[in-house]
């Protein structure tokens, strides 16, 4: 996915009616031409950024999967969205392994963020239709 594959980018709070809570999303990108107010908006990226001392793990990826489900339940179109984890301290082996088997997951560590290396070497941005 290139920058040309993204439309409006921002943060969001996603309502979880079953758990009676809201989930904060650090990065939500719409498909080009989509508007956030559109109830059937196509979403291309759902991301979480953490600057904690703990590496990110499979629970973080599962949280993004849950948010994608909530967005679909709210009639948005997140089925092709990339799930992106950004981490200051890197990633646990469980999430690295999971990402290596999926085309919809992007892991970005600090060196990739500052341009000193690519996102996880085995990862590439999925193409946007």
Image (tube, rainbow, N blue to C red):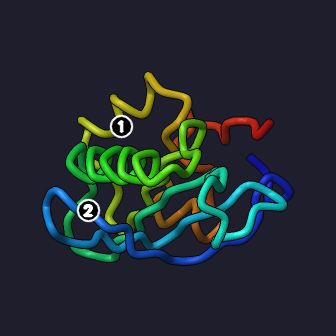
Badge count: 2
Whole-percent x, y for residue 54 in the image = 20, 65
Q: Looking at the image, which is closer to me, 107 or 38? A: 38
Task: Check disc 2: other Cα within 10 Å, few if <14, some if 14-19, many if 20+.
Answer: some
Q: Looking at the image, which is closer to me, 45 or 13? A: 13
**From what the image shows, is residue 43 above or below residue 98?**
below
Whole-percent x, y for residue 3 in the image = 80, 60
Quadrant for residue 22, please give it. bottom left
**From what the image shows, is residue 103 above or below residue 69?**
above
Q: Residue at x 35, y 44 (%)?
A: 65
CA gap, disc 1 and disc 2: 27 Å
Q: Residue at x 73, y 68 (%)?
A: 35
Q: Counting residues from the N terminus, which is met first, the one under dot 1 or under dot 2?
A: 2
Is residue 8 rendered to the left or right of residue 112?
right
Q: Residue at x 74, y 46 (%)?
A: 1
Whole-percent x, y for residue 114 in the image = 61, 71
The mark lying in front, picked from 1 and 2, is 2
Quadrant for residue 39, please give it. bottom right
Q: Looking at the image, which is closer to me, 30 or 109? A: 30
Task: Check disc 1: other Cα within 10 Å, few if <14, some if 14-19, many if 20+.
Answer: many
SS at circle 2: strand
Whole-percent x, y for residue 110 in the image = 48, 66
Residues tagged 1 and 2 counted as in contact (Cβ below 8 A): no
SS at circle 1: helix
- Identify the residue at the far left of this view: 19
Is residue 29 rendered to the left or right of residue 19?
right
Quadrant for residue 21, please give it. bottom left
Q: Which mark is residue 58?
A: none
Is residue 104 rendered to the left or right of residue 69?
right
The residue singled out by tag 1 in the image is: 96
The residue singled out by tag 2 in the image is: 16
């Amino acid at each position: 996915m290139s920058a040309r594959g993204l439309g409006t980018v921002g943060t969001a709070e996603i309502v979880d009616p079953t758990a009676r809570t809201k989930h904060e999303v650090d990065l939500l990108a719409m498909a080009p031409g989509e508007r956030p107010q559109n109830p059937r908006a196509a979403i291309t990226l759902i991301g979480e950024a953490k600057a904690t001392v703990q590496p990110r793990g499979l629970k973080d990826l599962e949280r993004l999967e849950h948010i994608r489900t909530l967005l679909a339940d709210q009639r948005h179109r997140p089925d092709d969205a990339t799930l992106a984890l950004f981490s200051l301290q890197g990633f646990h082996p469980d999430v690295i392994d999971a990402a290596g088997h999926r085309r919809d997951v992007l892991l970005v560590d600090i060196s990739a963020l500052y341009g000193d290396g690519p996102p996880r070497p085995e990862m590439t941005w999925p193409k946007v239709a």
